[in-house]
């Protein structure tokens, strides 16, 4: 499998190195690009091995460190002796290799091979007179864009697809969707494993606070035991200390601004902060990443944490701040790959991902606040629309649901309405459900949203 001296490694060698690196250290699996799947591997045996290892990983059965070759052969359903020899060679070949470079080189070769095949098929159809020129151009353009989309689709038979659908329906009937802690919202929006949910708002619209509320409710962070579920937050906007400060503000019922002002916290409030902090620390269900903003790092960290303890929810705050080291010509294409990768990651791990998004600037400027039905009533800002998602229409296409957080009274002269709303939580898109609106009352000073009917100061 060795390449000739002075030449670039061939595809067979690259594939062997990738599989060998995973066999030597299973953690390598979680650092691979999201679009490097078994469909990328041309050798059928190695493709089956990678598929089997990924399946074991999703079931959280993958042990850390070097993998047992006999076990891997059994997972893949392959002849143990012949395959074991092949895997031993791959393992030896991979020692000391730079996995990221090997993965990049393999994906480049895969794209080139796929592009050549795509062009060949399209030209054959054109020469045979079966395909019009415009259709050839469309096929090639769409096909080349799809090469960079993560997670190549697999064809499954009807029975397998039907069983998956029945499992999903049964899970929903048994309450299989995620509870966010907002009952009216949960009745309208069903957040299921593998879903990508996009939460969007205008700048300063409270989307980070609302997402943190949902995360804390899922984690049940105010309970000293780990009765809640694990939630991973990737924040590109706030540090860990800032996120925890907001969580403490909500738990201890203290204005978040006062936490950062000199000599404003009383001894009694300090005791309350310490007690709530102790509960959050004992609970341990909120996991934070505020250091790594690249797409590859977010995917790698999520896979590793999910392997350690299964995540119930992953939050990404927010899409437009995620960095992608690959160049795609335009920021729209870059954001398109980010949203597509997060959707594939959600499906791969069978975990819902709540991705926050900004709206474009035109959504802020397009209309001045207008009067409601009552001419003498407060001025009301128009609700956002799907086309106002910033920088990429692919966000809407990739999302299972799109939710807008909107304060119609943001331009009102009434300070109470301007600060507290009611806020509209608008379910603008839901693939397997209805659209609708839920109203919440905001108390952003306390970093909290609550049902609108619930009065201020209620538990």
Image (tube, rainbow, N blue to C red):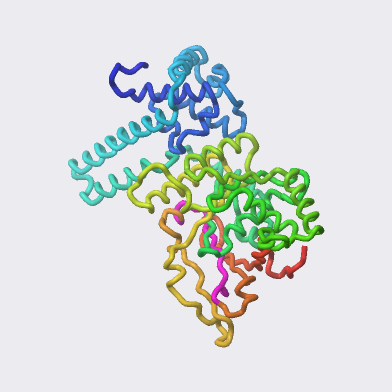
User: Residue 391: where, in percent of width, then height?
Assistant: 41, 57
Q: Relative to 272, does residue 107 appear above or below in the rendering?
A: above
The image quarter containing residue 410 is bottom right
What residue is rendered at 36% in x and 16% in y?
2
Relative image position of residue 394 (x, y in whole percent): 42, 53
- Judge left or right: residue 17 versus residue 438: left
The C terminus - image quarter: bottom right
- Is residue 6 in view from this perspective? yes
Q: Position of residue 70 (x, y in %)?
A: 56, 16
Q: Is residue 142 left or right of residue 296?
A: left
> How many numbered discs?
0
Q: Which residues are magenta?
A: 396-411
Q: Nearer the viewer, residue 188 or 164?
A: 188
User: Looking at the image, which residue sits at the far front?
Assistant: 263
| Residue at the spot 35% in from the left edge and 25% down from the top edge | 11
Residue 266 lies in what quarter of the image? bottom right
């Amino acid at each position: 499998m060795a390449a000739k001296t002075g030449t670039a490694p061939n595809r067979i060698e690259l594939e062997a190195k990738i599989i060998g690196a995973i066999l030597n250290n299973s953690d390598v699996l979680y650092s691979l690009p999201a679009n490097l799947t078994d469909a990328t591997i041309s050798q059928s045996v190695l493709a089956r091995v990678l598929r089997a290892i990924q399946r074991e990983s999703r079931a959280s059965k993958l042990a850390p460190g070097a993998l047992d070759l006999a076990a891997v052969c059994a997972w893949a359903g392959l002849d143990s002796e012949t395959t074991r020899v092949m895997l031993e060679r791959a393992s030896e070949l991979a020692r000391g290799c730079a996995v990221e470079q090997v993965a990049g080189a393999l994906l480049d070769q895969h794209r080139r091979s796929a592009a050549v095949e795509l062009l060949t098929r399209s030209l054959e159809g054109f020469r045979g007179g079966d395909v019009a020129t415009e259709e050839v151009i469309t096929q090639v353009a769409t096909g080349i864009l799809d090469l960079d989309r993560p997670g190549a689709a697999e064809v499954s038979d009807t029975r397998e697809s039907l069983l998956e659908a029945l499992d999903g329906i049964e899970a929903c009937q048994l309450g299989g969707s995620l509870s966010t802690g907002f009952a009216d919202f949960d009745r309208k929006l069903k957040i299921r494993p593998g879903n990508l949910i996009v939460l969007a708002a205008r700048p300063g619209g409270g989307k980070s606070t609302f997402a943190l509320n949902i995360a804390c409710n899922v984690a049940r962070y105010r309970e000293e035991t780990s009765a809640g579920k694990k939630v991973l937050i990737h924040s590109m906007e706030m540090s860990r200390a800032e996120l925890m400060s907001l969580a403490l503000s909500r738990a201890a019922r203290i204005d978040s601004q006062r936490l950062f002002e000199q000599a404003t916290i009383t001894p009694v409030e300090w005791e309350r902060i310490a007690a709530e902090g102790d509960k959050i620390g004992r609970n341990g269900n909120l996991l934070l990443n505020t250091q790594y903003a690249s797409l590859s790092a977010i995917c790698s960290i999520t896979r590793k944490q999910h392997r350690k303890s299964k995540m119930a929810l992953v939050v990404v705050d927010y899409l437009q701040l995620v960095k992608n080291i690959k160049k795609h010509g335009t920021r729209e294409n870059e954001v398109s790959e980010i949203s597509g990768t997060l959707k594939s990651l959600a499906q791969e791990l069978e975990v819902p991902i709540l991705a926050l998004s900004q709206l474009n600037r035109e959504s802020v400027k397009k209309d001045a606040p207008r009067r409601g039905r009552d001419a003498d009533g407060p001025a009301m800002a128009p609700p956002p629309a799907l086309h106002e998602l910033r920088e990429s229409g692919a966000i809407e296409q990739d999302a299972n649901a799109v939710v807008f957080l909107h304060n119609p009274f943001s331009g009102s002269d009434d300070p109470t309405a301007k600060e507290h709303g009611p806020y509209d939580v608008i379910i603008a898109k839901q693939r397997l459900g209805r659209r609708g609106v839920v109203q919440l009352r905001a108390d952003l000073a306390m970093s909290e949203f609550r049902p609108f009917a619930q009065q201020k100061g209620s538990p």
